[in-house]
Image (cartoon, grey):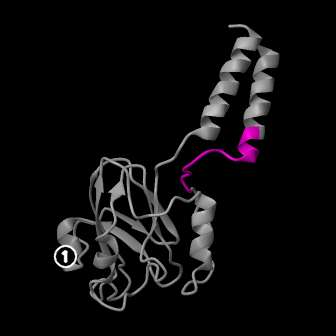
Amino acid sequence: MTKVQISLVLLAAACCLMVAPTSAMYHIVGGSLGWSVPPNKTFFEEWAKPRVFGVEDHLLFPFSGLHNVMEVSREDYYDCTLENAVKLYPFGPVILNFTQPGEHYYYSTVGTQCEYGQKLHITVVAGEGKSGKIYSTTEALGEISASPSHAPAPAPNSAPSAGPIGGLEMVIVGLVSFVAWQFV
């Protein structure tokens, strides 16, 4: 391939990334309440009921301090036990990205929060999610921080990104294209 051809391929790839539509949804658990002890035991069940969670969607658990998120088995979920725990997320906020369809069960293991209803069961479908809101990762974290019931939360260590790339990424793609063009 010539330098011009390589540059054109890289430019085309960058353009595709810029205009690529995103169908991934960010579902902020609990809405304005966030991930905290709910006012009733069915709050999170009612919150999840009208939503469709799809592959590539993101589930955001906005919390800090006195809460955590534990992914558990179906049995553990209903009994608030930890016999078949899958994974603990001790620090928030937590952003989960669904890569395949299936059932997911979560609750807080702090004290009796699970018994008081701080638990969530969702079904992830192969199609697109609905009833969430399309955000960039930065916008979603900003909304979590702006929520009146939560103090500003630190950004997670590795937040998955959904959507077109921004200005800084375009500069990087441009520089990589230029360097590749110089050395090929």
- Total labels: the figure holds 1
Task: Give the vertical position of 175 relative to 157 (above or below).
Answer: above
Q: What residue sits 40% from the left and 72% below the top?
A: 69
Q: Which residue is mark 1?
A: 78
| Residue 167 part of the magenta-drawn span | yes
- Residue 119 placement, left or right of 6: left
Asked whether residue 53 is in view, the answer is: yes
Task: Give the vertical position of 65 relative to 15 (above or below).
Answer: below
Highlighted range, magenta: 159-170
- Residue 89 placement, left or right of 154: left
Q: Quadrant of the C terminus?
A: top right
- Residue 7 placement, left or right of 138: right
Q: Quadrant of the N terminus?
A: top right
Residue 6, position in %: x, y? 70, 16
- Residue 15 placement, left or right of 184: left
* Label 1 CA crowd tier, 10 Å (few <14, some 14–19, many 20+): some
| Residue 158 part of the magenta-drawn span | no
Residue 159, position in %: x, y? 56, 57
Residue 172, position in %: x, y? 75, 38
Q: What residue sits 33% from the left and 60% below the top?
A: 52
Main secondary structure found in the magenta portion = loop
Of 128 and 142, which appears nearest the observer?
Answer: 128
Q: Amino acid at mark 1?
A: Tyr
Residue 38, position in %: x, y? 37, 87
* Residue farthest along the top direction in this orientation: 1
Of 15 and 56, which appears nearest the observer?
Answer: 15
Of 77 and 81, which appears nearest the observer?
Answer: 77
Q: What residue sits 29% from the left and 78% below the top?
A: 46
